[in-house]
Amino acid sequence: MTVTELNDKNLTSFLAYCRDHKYDHDESFLYDEDLKDFAIGPENPTWLLFDGDDLRGVLSLICDEYFVKGKRARIRIFHCEKTDIENYRSLLEAALPLDCPVDKMEMFLPDKLKETQSLIRDLGFTYYRTSFVMVRKNKEKTAARFPEGFSLKAIDPQRDAELYGEIRNAAFRNLKGSETPLSREDVLKHYNDKSVLTGGMAILRDGDKGAGIVRVIKEEDETGIYSFIAPIALIPEYQGRGLGKELLKAGISIGQENGLDDCMLVVNGENEQALRLYKGAGFEIDMSVSCFTFSSLL
């Protein structure tokens, strides 16, 4: 077995491997749109494990401005065809030390992949948190009803990007995995994502004051096509007033208006209040996914 860095000659093989194995991993950054825009460079350091001419495993990181700002590299895919720790170790050792200025790598794995989770623990990864993927399927249409004085409107990106980011950052300041603030440029990048639905980025206003946000994209997995609410957020002073329930309804409704009746979202496992809210709206836990971190980067 030999390990080599990604280059133009093996790019096609790498992208094909990602498509073939995305559901054997966390597929968050392995969809066709993501891979279509993939570019070789310092933001996407990638290593390939070959057995002769046959590609047997890959390790690919995301080291873009947002993740580096949070001092972490996000693992796009870390997978080998054989669950052999030495194959995984070869890829990991080839990647170290990282060139990007981060303190840790993080990766997500579905909890059904117990063998792979055990293997990466043996490599030195540490459990950090669990998230639940929740789905709402075959449910009735819904509509939001906000109190008098509140309105939900799709954002004008040039006018509203800073306010959208301020609301998101205030709401998620202490939420595991989301502490890194969004900049105006991050918000514009999210707005320009091709998966965002029509009207799918909106701000809830209390008069002229920002109170919350919702973003809804199109998501597809092996079970179907969904609207995906990511994120939904209220700044602290507006929490506990029933607005989250209506904002959730609005997110579901945006998907329905775009022809997507089934809805999906992800919630941190320790966020019991949000879990109760989502279950009350008809969402059910579809799967659990755990985050692992690796800090021995030297």
Image: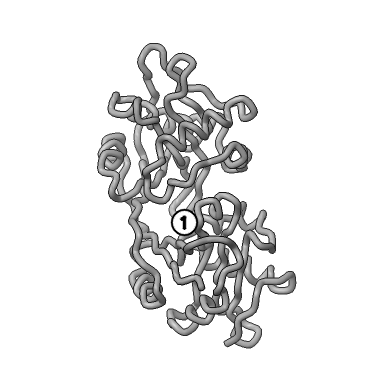
Position in image of residue 237 (x %, y %): 34, 26
Is residue 220 visible to the viewer in this orientation of the structure?
yes
The residue closer to the viewer here, 155 or 160, is: 160
Residue picked out by circle 1: 222
Q: Is residue 249 above or below residue 83?
A: above
Look at the picture and state if 58 lies above or below 39.
Answer: below
Question: Would residue 101 appear left or right of 296 to someone viewing this image?
Answer: right
What residue is shown at x 45% (from left), y 39% (from top)?
231
* Above or below 22: residue 267: above
**The disc labelled 1 sits on which kind of residue?**
Glu
- Whether residue 16 is visible, yes or no, is no
Across and down, in percent, residue 104 comes to 47, 63
- Badge 1: residue crowd in 10 Å (few <14, some 14–19, many ≥20): few
Q: Residue furthest right?
A: 8
- Element on which disc 1 rests: loop
Q: Position of residue 228 (x, y in %)?
A: 46, 42
Q: Nearer the viewer, residue 265 or 138?
A: 265
**Residue depicted at 57% across the width and 61% down the height:** 101
32 vs 89, nearest the viewer: 89
What residue is at 51 percent from the left and 76 percent from the top?
92
